[in-house]
Image (spheres, rainbow, N blue to C red):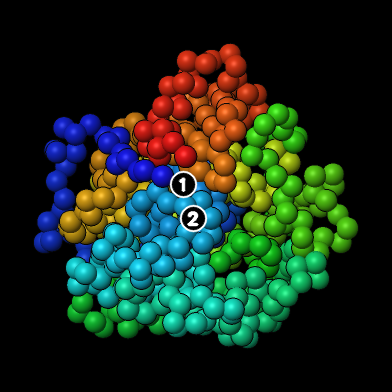
Amino acid sequence: MPMFRLLSVPLLLLSLIPNLSAEEAPRNVLLICIDDLRPELASFGANHIHSPNIDQLAQRGRAFHRHYVQAPTCGASRYTLLTGRYGGASNNAIFDRAKKLLAKPESISPSMPAWFREHGYTTVSVGKVSHHPGGRGGSDWNDDNQPEMPNSWDRHLLPAGQWQHPRGWMHGLAHGEIRENAKEMDVFQAEEGPDAIYPDGITIETALEQIDELAADPKPFFLAVGILRPHLPFGAPKQYLTHYSDATFPEIPHPARPVGKTTWHGSGEFMKYHRWGRDPNFDADFALAVRRHYAACVSYADAQVGKLLQRLKQAGLTDNTVIVLWGDHGWHLGEHAVWGKHTLFEESLRSPLIISYPGMPQPGASTNAIVETIDVFPTVCDLTGIEILDDVDGVSLRPWIDSPELEGHPAISYFRKAGTVRTDNYRLIAHSSGEFELYDENSEAGETENIADQHPEIVESLNQVLDERLGKK
């Protein structure tokens, strides 16, 4: 599938915004990747969510309220983050790249951590940054001979603790419970105890140790930390669930299953867990319980973010570090009768993005500009004074950091046999079978009323954008 470089900002505008010089630029990078995180945070307008640490970061940074991922699945989305390029739509995208890199290294562009490594940075990942926690293959995802991202990390770490190995850690519940048969594992849980009784609690301690170690090294660093929750199963210490015992949750918008050709699915990832015989699509009390436990996991993840920010401050690094917080995709909580990701609807594709660095203009001002995950790599280069790789498909977001009122650019996403483009006013979904979905994003009906037949000229125009950006499949 041919790829086309996005020229989404006028060239004159870009020419007026040169890269920061090495003397001006913050030296270090802290990239925080959070799994399955909806843009449902207090700083993004969700007052019922307890997320004080992420909100604090938004107050001193730039929150991109309309950031879209390229694919609504972990591996493919993280591929675009870590390469700045469109890629495959499966969870094997990063491993497929590794195979090509081994066979024909000159044909593969450097990843984001590899590029920083080439520019003198110490690169470290902790937790789930690429698709496999710790970044390795093998039956238990701990084979050093099968790196997911060759030549990228000086250290890629995943302390599995009582969960035995990265595969066990990935779907772990309290006290070392590993998913062997999902039908026997509860879909949500809230056990009494400290953060370390769930997987993120032990991983974050390793990340804090890495901050201390990197602070003592004169070399600049690129530290990526992957936080697992709120990924399924929804397990977090009970203290985080107490935030929601009396919270009022908004009604689920558009909860009905869509009609016609869509990317709807039966929520298989969610439904395979033990649910006590209950289905949230037909059981309002159970739906609310699911939403509360998801929110508890968000607050648990937020607490881990707080630990990172506090340790960075204690190490004296806050004034010299670019911080990026990124959600790898959204997650349906009943919208369109879906409980999961893997659709091309708004709920799967929109996720939080916050960028913060010392001395940035208008800290705390959010932007509604449409931007994409492929833009993160060139942005981090721009903000640290490193040359932007020629063949990335995104653009630096510095114009929107400097002027948050600027308009954004169309966002492209894809999954399985369909692609989509999101603009300020519309979402077009084009299926390989020839059907189209067109939604008016300013309508109360949102993504429930397909108006493609009424507006063939809009379909044609937006489909051309898809063809130009991705090429015909």
What percent of the width, then of the height, locates residue 21? 12, 56
Q: Residue at x 51, y 51 (%)?
A: 89
Q: Determine the CA span between mark 2 and mark 1.
A: 8 Å
Q: Is residue 440 above or below residue 70?
A: above
Q: Residue at x 36, y 51 (%)?
A: 85
Q: Which mark is residue 70?
A: 1
What percent of the width, then of the height, locates residue 309? 40, 67
Q: Residue at x 55, y 49 (%)?
A: 72
Q: Is residue 24 above or below residue 429?
A: below
Question: Residue 123, located in which quarter of the rendered image?
Answer: bottom left
The answer to whether residue 422 is left or right of residue 162 is: left
Q: Which mark is residue 281?
A: none
Q: Please say if the residues under marks 2 and 1 sit with CB atoms less than 8 Å apart.
A: yes
Q: Which mark is residue 76?
A: 2
What percent of the width, then of the height, locates residue 366? 39, 42
* Residue at the extreme front of the image, as rendered: 103
Question: Residue 214, located in which quarter of the rendered image?
Answer: bottom left
Camera-side residue of 53 and 120: 120
Name the amino acid type tagged 1. Gln
Decide which of tag 2 and tag 1 comes sooner along the chain. 1
Camera-side residue of 352 and 256: 256
What percent of the width, then of the height, locates residue 348? 58, 45
